[in-house]
Image (tube, grey):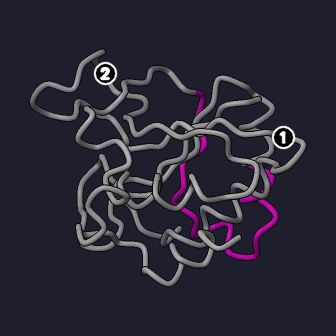
């Protein structure tokens, strides 16, 4: 098992999508790379993300990047859908340098590499989101999500 942190805008939809992917063993909604160890008040530089534990024999970092790029606008800075702000930036974070090299290689091989706004950085800290944010769209399927429902449904049937 390995762990990577995927940021793709509002974490509700990202978690709902990522947890359905082949090889993903567990997910947790949280915040990555902020300046504090708590989430009181402001977001203090955090990116909303999904802590993703996966089996590398089933799904690779490159595969996860392909999936992430299906649900984000990779050119948008600090915005996905109607959600705007630094906490909605896109990114890939990990404590494993190999994961970051693989994510960067995925981006670098794209013809549109110069336009990509997805950050790839070491994980400096992580804070789990409150229970109300865990698996939010499973519990409240009519809540807002920037990811089109047909994309979410596509992987639920695999």
Q: Is residue 9 magenta?
A: no
Left or right? Give the position of 97 relative to 119: right
Residue visible at 54% across and 26% down in the picture: 123
Q: How many marks?
A: 2
Above or below for 117 versus 4:
below
- Crowd band around label 2 with a 10 angstrom C-alpha radius: few (<14), some (14–19), many (20+): few
Above or below for 129 versus 78:
above
Instruction: Residue 81: name its quadrant.
Output: bottom left
- Farthest residue in the left direction? 41
The image shows residue 15 at horizontal and vertical percentages of 46, 52
The image shows residue 82 at horizontal and vertical percentages of 24, 72
The C terminus lies in quadrant: bottom right
Instruction: Residue 48: name its quadrant.
Output: top left
Residue visible at 46% across and 37% down in the picture: 28
The image shows residue 142 at horizontal and vertical percentages of 25, 72
The N terminus lies in quadrant: top right
Residue visible at 65% across and 23% down in the picture: 95
Q: Which residues are magenta?
A: 104-122
Nearest to the observer: residue 86 or residue 58: 58
From the image, tell me which residue sits under label 2. 35
Q: Is residue 105 magenta?
A: yes
């Amino acid at each position: 098992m390995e762990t990577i942190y995927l940021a793709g805008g509002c974490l509700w939809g990202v978690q709902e999508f990522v947890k359905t992917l082949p090889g993903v063993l567990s997910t947790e909604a949280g915040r990555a790379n902020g300046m504090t160890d708590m989430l009181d008040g402001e977001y203090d530089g955090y990116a909303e993300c999904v802590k993703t534990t996966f089996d590398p024999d089933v799904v690779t970092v490159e595969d996860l990047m392909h999936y992430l790029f299906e649900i984000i606008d990779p050119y948008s800075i600090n915005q996905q859908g109607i959600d705007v702000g630094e906490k909605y930036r896109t990114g890939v974070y990990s404590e494993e340098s190999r994961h970051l090299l693989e994510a960067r290689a995925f981006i670098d091989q794209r013809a549109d590499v110069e336009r990509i706004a997805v950050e790839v950085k070491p994980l400096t800290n992580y804070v789990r989101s409150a229970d109300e944010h865990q698996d939010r769209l499973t519990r409240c399927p009519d809540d807002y999500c920037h990811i089109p429902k047909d994309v979410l449904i596509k992987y639920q049937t695999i």
